[in-house]
Image (cartoon, rainbow, N blue to C red):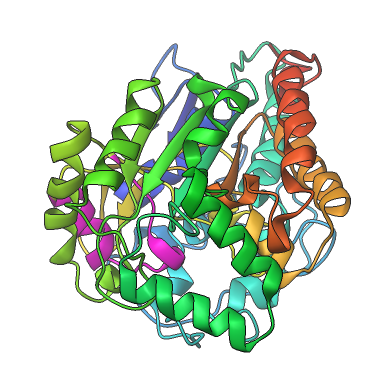
Amino acid sequence: MIDLIIDQPSPRIDYACDLVLGRILGVRWRTLSQPEPGGGLAIWYTPANPKDRYHLPCNGWLYEKGLRPFIPPIELGPVPLLFPLRHSHAAIPFDLLAATFYLATEYARWLEHPRDPHGRPDPAGYFPWQNKLHQLPLVHHYADQLKSWLLSLQPALQFHPPKFSFEIAIDVDQPWRYLHRDALVKTGSWLRDLLRGNQEENAARRLALRTGDDPYAPEKFLDLLPVEKTLFFFLVGRQSPHDNRFPLPHPAYEKLICQVADRGFRTGLHPSYLSSDRPEIIPAEKTALEKVTGQTVYARQHFLKYQYPSTFEALLDAGIREEYSLSTFHEPGFVAGMAVPFPWFNLKENQVTQLILHPCMIMDRTLQQYMQLQPEEAAKLILKMAQQVKRANGKFVLNLHNETFSEVAEWKGWKSMLIPLIARLKEMETDEGNLQAKSGD
């Protein structure tokens, strides 16, 4: 048991402790105003450093409420440290809980920051990404430092971290490449490819229309996926040109969604492109999906667009409880420094919520479009990221799209790469040797 001695109650301190001590390290903890006789290992987290006491550095920031614009001090290195202590030889030379809170709440994203054309943080000017804070599961590295220190103080402490697991999140943005489009769209696509001299595409279109076999159709690859590990997110609204051409109700799309759900796959909502700016869209889209699948509690924002706090507040109000939008788009990484699911903290209300955030570490479009990797190169990077998550005892979430399995156009070679890769992820779940389970258990 860890007894954290604090000056006054703070939901922000409790939140940071829950993430580091509870969800990552799996050790019992509580916050107290003073030690209790016969209590746990007492650690003071106070701005003042008491004599002859175990002290965790505290700059006082977590006792604040509300938001204020600032850039945290940072010490760059193999493991970047936020809120470092100057000229310190302490075992923990930075405010570990403040750093955890800053990363896990995406505090920088709540403030004014440069945005890309889609309204997402611009990697060139967004402080966490500028400083490569997303390249490591930083909160897990911080937790490992804390664990080493705690074991040096009390070697008998018991830790029960989670085990490595993986999940595949599949976005269905365009369920078909050729089928079920209206006559005007079919004719326009045919004329476009004719004028461009794209005979191969028109031949593929004619074949699909004649046979009813579309390369994007999800039912073609369902047998390749582990049912218990796979979650489908369906885009069901058309609010902008960035959305699909099959808004519900649509008979063929409804049948497809039912096929996926009837196979036992979990299904969730992929809120449309404008939903981050118009959160009132979300309940209607969720209702449309639930008329087909029954109740769902899962969501992942289209284009990874979300605004704090309005998007997540709207998701909560609509009954969403599991959210998968925390993901970088320009390169693989760890948004919020986390590699395990964790609750969203609403900074505006200064309280933890019932919405559980599931960080996604890597996305197919990041690899193919932004990084322009070949399938073999992508496989190596995916497994490298998975190993990184395994060492952190986290949950590796791989984000794919239905067209990734199509073996057409830019996705040639990806299906044949993904089949053995998914098998390897299954093997990794049973492998021994998680990072933090090796000692102190």
**Residue 92, image x and y in percent?**
70, 48
Image point (33%, 22%), residue name: 262
Image point (58%, 27%), residue name: 225
Q: Nearer the viewer, residue 300 or 136?
A: 300
**Residue 437, image x and y in percent?**
72, 18
**Residue 231, image x and y in percent?**
45, 35
In the image, is 164 to the left or to the right of 438? left
Q: Is residue 363 above or below residue 296?
A: below
**Residue 308, image x and y in percent?**
31, 68
In the image, is 406 to the left or to the right of 315? right
Q: Is residue 306 shown in magenta?
A: yes
Q: Is residue 121 above or below residue 355?
A: below
Q: Nearer the viewer, residue 307 or 402?
A: 402
Quadrant in which residue 373 is drawn: bottom right
In the image, is 279 to the left or to the right of 25? left
Which region is colored magenta?
Answer: 298-317
Image point (44%, 72%), residue name: 109
In the image, is 70 to the left or to the right of 159? left
Q: Is residue 184 shown in magenta?
A: no
